[in-house]
Image (cartoon, rainbow, N blue to C red):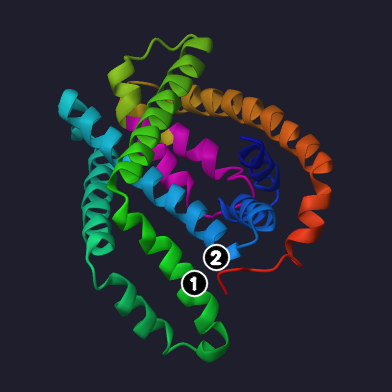
Amino acid sequence: FVLNLIGKFFGNFMPGMIGGDVARILLLGGQIGSHSRSAASVIMERLTGLVGLAVVATAAAALNPSVLRFWFVSLPIAVAAAACSGLTLVYLHSGCADLSMRLLMRAPYAERLSAKAAAFIAALTRYRGRPRLLLSALGCAVGFHLLACLNVFTAARAIGFEAAFLDVMAVTPVILLLTAIPVSPRGIGWWEWSFGVLFAGAGGTPAQGVAAALILRAVTLVISLLGGLFFLAERRSFQTAGAAPDSSG
C-alpha cells in the first residue's frame, strides 16, 4: 500500500505510469534484494490490471449495449479485448520465454543485459505455474476497476450529473486506457480532454466531463502527497535500492 502511494507521488512528475513504476521497482527491489523479481511483480500487476480493465469494459458493454453506438467507446473496448486475449495466450504459451530471449539477444548490448533479462523473464514466467495466484490477481484487478467506475460515478454525482452507473462503467475503462498513454506528467490536459469527450457516452457534456475530471485529479493529488510523506520516511530504503545485491542476477 505504501509503495503504491509512493508510486503515485512520483507519477506527478513523469508521463503516464513510468515514474511511479520505476520508484516501486527500485524500492521493492531494495527490500527483497532482487530488482528482477520486483520488476516482474510490478509488470505483472500492470498486465493483470489491463486484462481486468478489458473484462470490466466487456462486461459493461454486454450489460449495456446501447453505449456501443459511440465508436470512441466501442472501438477501444474491442481493441482492448482482442489485445488482452492475445496477450494472455502468448503469456501462457510455454515457448514465450524462449522467444523473448531470442528476440532480446538480437538487441544492441544484449550480452551485457542477458543475465538480468534472463532473471527477469524467469521471474515473470514463474506465475504461469501458479494459476490460483494469477486468478487472485485478476480478481483484485477487476475489483479495483469496478471501484474506479464507482469513483467516477461519485464524481459525476458530485457535480449534479445524474449518470447511469452502467454508462459510467462502460466509459471509465476507455478513459483509463487512453490516459495510460504517456502524453504529459500526470496526464495534465490529456486526462481532462478524455473525460470531456468520453462523457458523451454516458450522456454527459464536455463541461461535465472536465468538471468530474478536475474533482478526481484533486483527490488523486491529495492522496499522492501522502505518498511523498511516506517516501521521506522510506528514503533510506530508496537510497540503498541501487546498491542492493540482486540475488537473481
Number of on-image labels: 2
Percent position of residue 145, x then y:
40, 31
Instruction: Examine the rendered structure and indicate whether residue 229 appears above or below residue 64.
Output: below
Whichever of callouts 2 and 1 sits on the residue coming sooner in the sequence is 2
Residue 174 shown in magenta: yes
Q: Which mark is residue 177?
A: none
Figure quadrant of residue 103: bottom left
Callout 2 secondary element = helix
Q: Are marks 2 and 1 in contact (CB under 8 Å)?
A: yes
Q: Nearer the viewer, residue 125 or 10?
A: 125
Left or right of 197 in this view: 131: left
Q: What residue did someone put label 2 on? A: 36
Within 10 Å of disc 1 (Cα), the crowding (few <14, some 14-19, many 20+) is some
- Along the line of sight, which residue is nearer the eye, 89 or 125? 125
* Label 2 environment density (alpha carbons within 10 Å; few <14, some 14–19, many ≥20): many
- Residue type of the residue flagged with mark 2: Ser
Residue span colored magenta: 171-196
Viewer-proximal residue among 116 and 47 = 116
Query: Residue 75 versus residue 28: which sits nearer the camera?
Result: 28
Q: Mark 1: which secondary structure?
A: helix
Give amino acid for label 1: Ala
Residue 138 rendering spot, x and y as whole percentages = 34, 40
Q: Main secondary structure of the magenta part?
A: helix
Q: Quadrant of the N terminus?
A: top right
**Disc 1 target residue:** 119
